[in-house]
Image: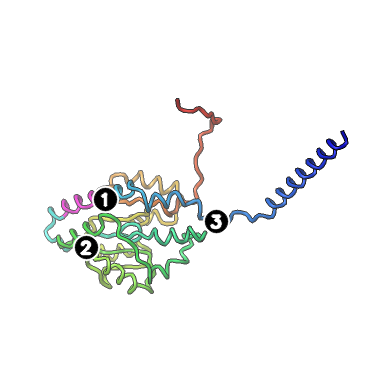
Amino acid sequence: MMRIRRGTAILAATAGLMLVGAAAAQEAAPADDCAVREFAMGLRFQQQSAEIRALQLQAYNIARMRLDAAVEGAEDASKLAVVTDLDETVIDNTALLARDLADCHMYDAWDTWLPWEREGLPALIPGALDFLTHADRLGVTIRYISDRADQQKSDTMATLTSLGLPQISEESVLLLGPPKVERRDIVSADHQIVLLLGDTLHDFDGRFRKTPLDAQRATVVEESAKWGTEWIVFPNAGYGTWSGASLTEWAAEPVIEPWE
């Protein structure tokens, strides 16, 4: 009986030490500071899904139909303008975002973008080259309005030229400086803007810039007639003003009920 009690005591002591050790290790373990990891599923959708390609091609197909109709009714196609954003609308930067995510670097701090703009090799968004080449052949003016760094304009222009995009010049590429609404005003001073293309809502209207999400949603509904007619929006699940928003939950208690 004494041997059994001693063995039991040793086992109990060992188990106790293991629990204390596990608790200490858990307390000593660093907290998960890889906040960017929460974007992994959205970024995977943005870069890898077939659905994203379908949505991008769908957007460009609609843009082409709208542009053809506008040109058909115009006296001078060169007085018409297509204004498009670049990042995630014409060019795909998800390789940079994926690299930063793998390094647990919060990529929407934008502090890795300057080297990417100089040296990175973005891919084209599906449908972008075909649409913009078509607009160019129709004689329509193209203006690229982006918040890429203006001090690196020559690098961005070289990238766009290497991708085969049309009408790349100092005049046609309008980068970060005045707000986008002011750069659009520069275009509309001597052109009729018939299409705006972008992946974030301030690519379309100044009311979307630095405003709360509920106000943005209200403006989206207010301008419902413009989506797909004058404004062509592209999906971007990688980053955006929505990224810090809380989710709305179903209040009911969860019930686990397997499918039969």
Which of disc 1 and disc 3 is earlier in sequence? Answer: 3
The magenta-colored residue range is 58-70
State the residue in front, 93 or 26: 26
State the residue in front, 4 or 224: 4
What percent of the width, then of the height, locates residue 52? 33, 49
Separation (CA) of disc 3 from disc 1: 33 Å
Q: Residues within 10 Å of mark 3 (few under 14, many from 20)?
A: few
> In percent of the image, x 47 and y 52: which residue is there?
39
Which of disc 2 and disc 3 is earlier in sequence? Answer: 3
Q: How many marks?
A: 3
What percent of the width, then of the height, locates residue 113? 43, 66
135 vs 53: above or below = below
Quarter of the figure that contains the N terminus: top right
Look at mark 3 in the image and give the residue it sits on.
Answer: 34
Can you see residue 177?
A: no
Look at mark 2 in the image and give the residue it sits on.
Answer: 191
Separation (CA) of disc 3 from disc 2: 47 Å
Give the label, 3 or 2, closer to the camera: 3
Under circle 2, the secondary element is loop
